[in-house]
């Protein structure tokens, strides 16, 4: 028999505390950068003791990697949901994908910074950013016309992911001054042109 306290099980309470720690890490890493994320700072932001931190994570690095993987999974699912098949018009597919990315990673810039900026500054994530590229390239590759040679599709997909990542990184870092509308239009143009 599972014991409950205040109507929740121990597993439910542990999961809720883990979610609070991840939310606190998102706030810190996505707003103030890698240096702001320590076990103590995350616990303070989550209003939990360190005992509860170590209930879910072995150390700060494990927390940061878990956060990165959570945000990456959210983005991947948002893109899959936005473009369910590759039979639609290339421009419509590109618009759906770019808008899905903006809604997740630009409208909540903390998530965009975790995905695109944190791997550059946080040693725990440096390999993760590189490891994630093939998964997103595969999503792009699936949308490219089958008449393209396999190696051309692969190179085009990797090139597009790199170009888009750099554009969004510049936007999030404030070094790219194009308006939101201009950036969206440019990204849609890049993707649609490759898929036409």
Image: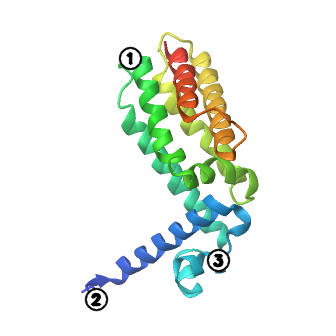
Between disc 1 and disc 3, whose residue precedes? 3
Q: Report the Cα–Cα distance between label 1 and label 3.
A: 47 Å
- Residue 120 pos. (x, y %): 74, 50
Camera-nearest residue between 122 and 117: 117
Query: Residues under labels 3 and 2: Cα distance?
Result: 28 Å
- SS assignment at label 1: loop
Residue 89's disc number: 1
Numbered label attached to residue 80 = none
Mark 2 and mark 1: Cα distance apart in space:
52 Å
Task: Write the residue at 57% across / 28% down.
Answer: 182
**Residue identified by numbered label 2:** 6
Where does the image place residue 153, in percent across and percent down from the top left? 57, 19
Q: Secondary structure at mark 2?
A: loop
Q: Most extreme residue toward the top, as rendered?
A: 147
10 vs 155, left or right, is left
12 to 162, vertically: above or below: below
In the image, is residue 125 above or below residue 190? below
The quadrant holding residue 3 is bottom left
Q: Quadrant of residue 157?
A: top right
**Circle 3 residue:** 41
18 left or right, relative to 51? left
Within-10-Å neighbours for mark 2: few <14, some 14–19, many 20+ = few
Dot 3 falls on a residue whose secondary structure is helix
Which of the 4 image quadrants contains residue 9? bottom left
Few, some or many C-alpha atoms within 10 Å of disc 3 (few <14, some 14-19, many ≥20)? some
The tag earlier along the polypeptide, 2 or 1, is: 2
Q: Is residue 108 left or right of residue 10?
A: right
Between circles 3 and 2, the one closer to the viewer is 3
> Looking at the image, is mark 3 or mark 2 earlier in the sequence?
2
Q: Which residue is at the front of the view, 131 or 194?
A: 194
């Amino acid at each position: 028999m599972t014991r409950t306290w205040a109507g929740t099980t121990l597993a439910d309470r542990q999961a809720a505390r883990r979610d609070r720690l991840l939310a606190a890490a998102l706030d810190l890493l996505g707003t103030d950068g890698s240096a702001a994320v320590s076990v103590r700072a995350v616990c303070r932001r989550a209003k939990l003791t360190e005992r509860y931190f170590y209930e879910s994570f072995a150390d700060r690095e494990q927390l940061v990697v878990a956060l990165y993987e959570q945000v990456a999974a959210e983005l991947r699912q948002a893109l899959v949901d936005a473009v369910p098949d590759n039979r639609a018009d290339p421009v419509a597919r590109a618009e759906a994908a770019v808008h899905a990315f903006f809604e997740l990673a630009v409208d909540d810039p903390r998530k965009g910074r975790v995905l695109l900026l944190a791997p550059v500054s946080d040693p725990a994530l440096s390999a993760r950013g590189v490891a994630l590229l093939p998964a997103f390239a595969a999503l792009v590759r699936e949308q490219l016309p089958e008449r393209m040679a396999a190696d051309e599709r692969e190179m085009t997909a990797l090139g597009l992911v790199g170009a888009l990542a750099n554009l969004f990184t510049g936007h999030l870092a404030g070094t790219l001054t194009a308006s939101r509308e201009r950036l969206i239009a440019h990204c849609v143009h890049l993707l649609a042109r490759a898929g036409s």
